[in-house]
Amino acid sequence: MIVAASKSVAVRIWCGCVQNATCRPWSQVSGGRAIVSADRPGLFIAVVGPSGAGKDTLMRAVAARLQDRPDIRFAQRVITRDADPDNEDHEVLSRAEFADARQDGEFCLDWEAHGLCYSLRREAAAHVEGGGVLIANLSRGVLSEAATQFSRMDVLEITARPDIRVERLLARGRETVEDIRSRIAREMPISVANLPGRIVTIDNSGRLDDAVDVLEAYLAGARSSS
């Protein structure tokens, strides 16, 4: 269902109840491990998106536009990868340092992907606990675990038309067109059991500024309801 649009950008918002999952109140999270209390419900927004959707570019653009909004924070991830000006601004840890920090309980969420370790520090979750909005880039594989950690959580999927994604990925020069099309054909819809929020999909096939406008409007609405 398309509920909002800006020029060529469509936004689809779906209830978090997918497959056999069950909707629950914001304050109810299985196992009693919710980070956010019911009386000060902040919002955690997990950003996902396939390669070529322009997710990182869109996140950087909207972060620059909202830099004077302390209530909306973009989480800095901890990654066992060297710093690279062409990639995100992340905190660098070695694998040994990462393991020690995890053992000491310094992370609210951690996962592995593509041979690297990723995490969010507990300080980031404290922003949600205080009633703010926290936006973080996650792997699809950790979404269900994240849904047990936050009592209000939306999944924000950034996507683009297959032909646009093929064009963008070809420009990177890392894969053949056949490899890219085969990978796109294997992709599955997002499914998060017991998601305490919504799945919001933004099509980033067109102009970047249009997508930024739509994302900013979504964040404004998310903040006003928290």
Image (cartoon, rainbow, N blue to C red):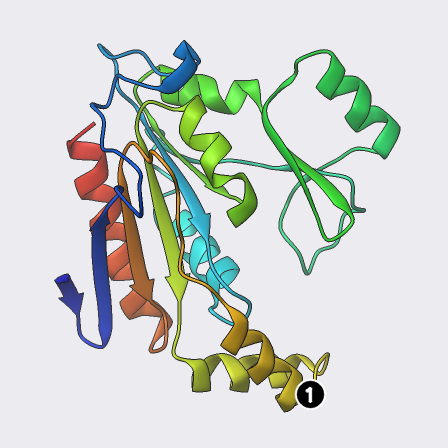
Q: Residue at x 26, y 36 (%)?
A: 197
- Residue 204 placed where, x, y %? 36, 70
Q: Residue at x 22, y 62 (%)?
A: 11
Q: Is residue 147 left or right of residue 119?
A: left
Compared with residue 33, is residue 86 higher up or lower down, i.e. above or below?
below
Q: Is residue 224 left or right of residue 42?
A: left
Q: Nearer the viewer, residue 26 or 63?
A: 26
Residue pointed to by mark 1 = 176
- Residue 168 placed where, x, y %? 54, 81
Q: Nearer the viewer, residue 85 or 18?
A: 18
Amino acid tagged 1: Thr
Which residue sits furthest front? 20
| Rendered-image quadrant of the C terminus | top left
| Rendered-image quadrant of the N terminus | bottom left
Compared with residue 122, is residue 214 higher up or lower down, i.e. above or below?
below
Asked whether the viewer can see residue 88, the reply is yes
Count the numbered circles shown. Answer: 1
- Residue 182 placed where, x, y %? 59, 81
Q: Quadrant of residue 43?
A: top left
